[in-house]
């Protein structure tokens, strides 16, 4: 048995010694903890926020659903989700909404950040507000932007021409008639994006957006433009490949373009020597034709190849100066130039999109002036990837089919001084009828007049060429 008084005395003696020791140890531990905290290495891993702005309130609605599934699949392969924010603004036939694709314990989750009342996603104010608010919520060291919809490049919108052209995007809203839809001009797109962020890249998942006029207009909005100079499949990019590339720390634009191209190239098998054409093949036949099988959905049997290029916006001013020198030397007093030998991305159906490199080569005869100019072009277009053929709905006089990309170099341009403009399939058809002559000529004058609104028009010297 313990003797109570002695036990208490011993305990108190021990307490007189132990308590100060414990207190000293606690203070020492706290001091060490403070040192450890102060010495922790700061996380310097760069963050990136990528926003996919999907205007799918149109005929592409169902394709947007599939691309969203592919984005989820692709995000599962992102190496560093903690530093990689993937946002999707989706305006389809449902309620417009802002989504975030994340990983939780290795599982991909889609969260709804915000919903909107039915809005015109192609108005300057709405686009600027939606993108700005999204990026403010997910601030990062760098930003990427995907602009997803229909596209027609530099062309004026339907509202301006009374013809079905879209510039960028098509938002039907509650309308069912595409003639009454909203579109966005490139000038408005520039106003919407200006001042939001200096995007590392803008990826256009839309037709015919890689034109020098578009790139030059947006050169102060992004470091790089990734887009196609011609038509792209309604299935668009394979986002199960593209999403991981979006968050590449260096050369992200090149990685995105390569990822965009990869699945199309892998599944491409078009045989130009085979009989028949992709638009009249027998049901179920796929051998000998290019096709993209798609990511998660895998339901596509489109007979498309694809072309995609990267434009370095920092090299565009030098390209404009070099082009101005050429135009001032070779086009004077409003002279027209022959363009029949220049590669045409719309298969000579409208004559809206010529290959810029091919145009300068033809204009100069490919001599020393061209060789000098080409160095600036190569700097501005560091990457161009294409299958041997791509599908064009305008080929074969508008019936559709595969068209060769042999003379394409990846960047289109309009040529206002075009003596062959009216040779295009569309215009020549109507010019058979005298009652349409004045209308077609008025269209040509309007397009040339509208073209003067682009910064490229004066920067490249068209303004002093007489055009």
Image (cartoon, rainbow, N blue to C red):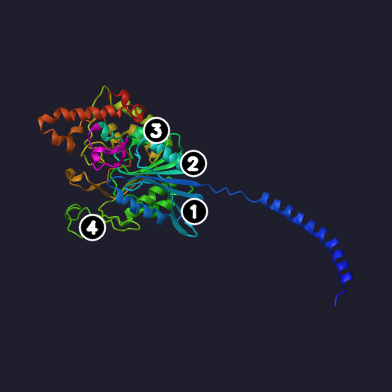
Residue extending furthest bottom?
1
Q: Which residue does the numbered mark 3 point to in the structure image?
A: 191
Kindly report the distance in space between the C-alpha atoms of the residues bearing marks 3 and 4: 45 Å
The x and y percentages for residue 63 are: 31, 51
Kindly report the distance in space between the C-alpha atoms of the residues bearing marks 2 and 3: 18 Å
The x and y percentages for residue 165 are: 26, 37
Give the answer, above or below, for where 231 lies relative to 2: above
Label 3 secondary element: helix
Label 1 secondary element: helix
Label 4 secondary element: loop
Residue at left 42%, top 38%?
Answer: 129
Q: Residues within 10 Å of mark 3 (few under 14, many from 20)?
A: some
Question: Circles 3 and 4: CB distance less than 8 Å?
Answer: no
The numbered mark at residue 458 is none
> Magenta stretch containing residue 455, yes or no?
no
The x and y percentages for residue 228 are: 32, 44
Residue stretch rendered in magenta on the structure: 161-184
Depth check, front residue: 438 or 64: 64
> Magenta stretch containing residue 167, yes or no?
yes
Question: Circles 2 and 3: CB distance less than 8 Å?
Answer: no
Q: Which residue does the numbered mark 4 point to in the structure image?
A: 288
Residue at left 20%, top 47%?
Answer: 400
Q: Specify whether residue 333 is in view.
A: yes
Of tags 2 and 3, the one toward the viewer is: 2
| Sequence order check, earlier mark of 2 and 3 | 2
Kindly report the distance in space between the C-alpha atoms of the residues bearing marks 1 and 3: 31 Å
Q: Which residue does the numbered mark 2 point to in the structure image?
A: 136
Give the answer, above or below, for where 247 lies relative to 211: below
Q: Which residue does the numbered mark 1 point to in the structure image?
A: 81
| Sequence order check, earlier mark of 2 and 1 | 1
Question: Circles 2 and 4: CB distance less than 8 Å?
Answer: no
């Amino acid at each position: 048995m313990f003797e109570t008084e002695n036990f208490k005395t011993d305990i108190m003696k021990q307490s007189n010694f132990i308590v100060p020791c414990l207190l000293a140890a606690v203070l020492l531990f706290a001091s060490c903890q403070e040192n450890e905290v102060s010495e922790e290495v700061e996380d310097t891993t760069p963050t990136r926020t990528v926003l996919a702005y999907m205007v799918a309130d149109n005929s592409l609605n169902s394709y947007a659903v599939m691309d969203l599934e592919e984005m989820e699949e692709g995000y599962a392969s992102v190496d560093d989700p903690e530093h990689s924010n993937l946002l999707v603004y989706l305006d389809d036939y449902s309620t417009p909404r802002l989504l975030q694709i994340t990983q939780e314990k290795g599982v991909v989750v889609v969260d709804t950040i915000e919903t909107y009342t039915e809005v015109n996603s192609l108005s300057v104010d709405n686009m600027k507000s939606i993108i700005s608010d999204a990026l403010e919520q997910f601030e990062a060291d760098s930003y990427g932007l995907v602009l997803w919809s229909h596209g027609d490049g530099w062309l004026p919108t339907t509202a301006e021409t009374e013809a079905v052209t879209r510039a960028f995007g098509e938002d039907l809203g509650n309308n069912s008639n595409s003639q009454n839809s909203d579109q966005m001009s490139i000038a408005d797109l520039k106003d919407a994006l200006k001042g939001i962020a200096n995007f590392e890249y803008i990826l256009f998942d839309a037709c015919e957006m890689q034109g020098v006029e578009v790139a030059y207009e947006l050169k102060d909005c992004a470091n790089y433009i990734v887009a196609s100079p011609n038509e792209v499949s309604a299935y668009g990019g394979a986002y199960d490949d593209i999403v991981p590339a979006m968050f590449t720390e260096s050369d992200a634009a090149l990685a995105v373009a390569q990822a965009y191209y990869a699945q199309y190239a892998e599944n491409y098998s078009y045989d130009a020597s085979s009989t028949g054409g992709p638009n009249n093949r027998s049901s179920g036949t796929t051998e000998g034709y290019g096709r993209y099988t798609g990511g998660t959905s895998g339901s596509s049997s489109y007979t498309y190849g694809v072309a995609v290029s990267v434009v370095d916006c920092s090299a565009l001013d030098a390209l404009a100066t070099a082009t101005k020198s050429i135009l001032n030397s070779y086009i004077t007093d409003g002279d027209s130039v022959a363009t029949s030998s220049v590669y045409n991305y719309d298969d000579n159906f409208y004559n809206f999109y010529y290959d810029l490199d091919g145009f300068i080569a033809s204009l100069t005869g490919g001599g020393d002036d061209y060789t000098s100019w080409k160095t600036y072009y190569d700097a501005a277009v560091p990457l161009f990837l294409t299958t041997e053929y791509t599908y064009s709905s305008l080929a074969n006089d508008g019936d559709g089919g595969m068209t060769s990309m042999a003379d394409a170099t990846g960047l289109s341009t309009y040529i206002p001084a075009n003596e062959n403009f009216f040779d295009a399939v569309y215009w020549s058809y109507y010019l058979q009828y005298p009652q349409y002559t004045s209308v077609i000529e008025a269209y040509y004058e309007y397009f040339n007049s509208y073209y003067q609104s682009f910064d490229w028009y004066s920067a490249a010297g068209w303004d002093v060429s007489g055009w």
